[in-house]
Amino acid sequence: MSACADLLFLFLLSTELQKEEEEQEQLGESPGSISGAACDYNHPYYDVARHGILQVTGDDNYGRKLIIFSSCCMPPSHQLNHQRLLEYLKYTLDQYVESDYTIVYFHYGLRSRNKPSLAWLRQAYKEFDRKYKKNLKALYVVHPTNFIRILWNIFKPLISHKFGKKVTYVNYLGELREHLNYDQLIIPPEVMRHDEKLRAAQRGGPPPPIKTPPPRPPLPTQQFAVSLQYIREKNKGLLIPPVMSQTVSYIREKGLYTEGIFRRSARVQLVKDIQKLYNVGKPVNFDDYNDIHVPAVILKTFLRELPEPLLTFELYEQIQDIIRVESSLRVKACKDIIESLPEHNFIVLKYLICFLHMISQESIRNKMNPSNLACVLGVNLIWPPQGSVSLSELNPLNIFTEILIEHYHTVFSTRSPPNQVLP
């Protein structure tokens, strides 16, 4: 059974929905409502996408594309063409399944009135093939009911062992903090209210606020989760952060022709171990790991953990507006935008984009053209000041990044900061 079919299997086999609805009513809940979602009217599946059922919210903590499915956003069955829903699921996933990806499935809100038929499940099972399965690295089932757990145990022998290891039950939203950047998740308000009531019911009173420990002061050798300015000050004015220069140099030397470079992820513990080595000032030798995708993941992780994105929060709205610019004028618009960056950010960005342009020049061998690189790296260059990049916001972000990579020499032609070192 394919990964997506396995997910749909869990999603649809809730035949005791009436019982669940009664249990939720005891908690003072009403059936889930539709969460509005900002969506481009020109989207080929606008009629489905506008409900916000599926969201792609950037990357998880380990460089894997993060896809969210929210059952509570499913409208009543008579208001949604389920054949169009299936086409929309495939249309969206097809853009990301060539890379490693993660799914978060919010189960709350699935009702008899919005549940697709079993005939639809059978059709989905036939259409979702191996390509949707092989790169799924984790599936988080949030707020699973007891019935889902029982079904999982019954049907576990029929589901592949590999897929079974990828499934994690998440009883409360706070548990997602162990696996994902919780603050960047797009969580429907209905799901948040349901979580609060579950926690209140468990404790017999109102849920206490979720406390996060105060941040520890960074080490002088810290490389991850600190600002570019901090790294520069602690490294004697070095313009390019050591993590970036070392990963770029290694990939340029040994991975330039690697097919799908930047599309793969690495073992979670391995990424943490390498981060720790960098943060305590110990040397990292990527030859020890015998995997060219490891430095690529470390580079994406470094960018994603910057307190402020490389392209800065200030430019987020301007970059989103790139789709409103006439196509023939977009290169100049991108050039104008990046020239407003602080000098240090500009230097680091130019170094990175020069390297990505170099990779794209070998796309016949590595299969990573500017569009593919933009798809996997764009969300690591900029994100909104609060929340995460929604599915509707990914397109302009990717267009902007693709232009930077494809038209590198034009975009970075005039502003030449002093002492810049290119890869």
Image (cartoon, grey):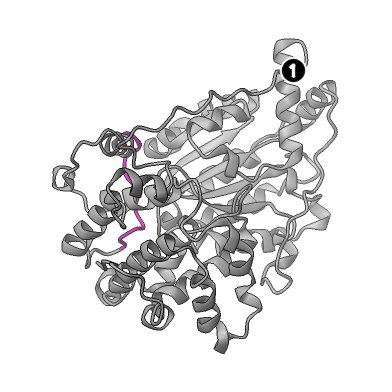
For the view shown, which residue lies furthest in the left direction? 287
In x, y percent, where is residue 106? 64, 39
Q: Which residues are magenta?
A: 260-269
In x, y percent, where is residue 348? 37, 61
Which residue occupies the foreground of this view, 239 or 76? 239
Which residue occupies the foreground of this view, 317 or 5? 317
Q: Main secondary structure of the magenta part?
A: loop
Q: Which residue is mark 1?
A: 200
Image quadrant where residue 29 sits: top right
Q: Is residue 346 above or below residue 200?
A: below
In x, y percent, where is residue 133? 43, 50
Q: Residue at x 26, y 75 (%)?
A: 362
Q: Residue at x 66, y 78 (%)?
A: 324
For the view shown, which residue lies furthest in the bottom direction? 328
Image quadrant where residue 24 sits: top right
Q: Residue at x 53, y 32 (%)?
A: 177
For the C terminus, the image quarter is bottom left
- Left or right: where 344 falls relative to 197: left
Does residue 135 appear in this view?
no
**SS type, badge 1:** helix
Q: Check if residue 261 falls in the magenta segment.
A: yes
Does residue 222 appear in this view?
yes
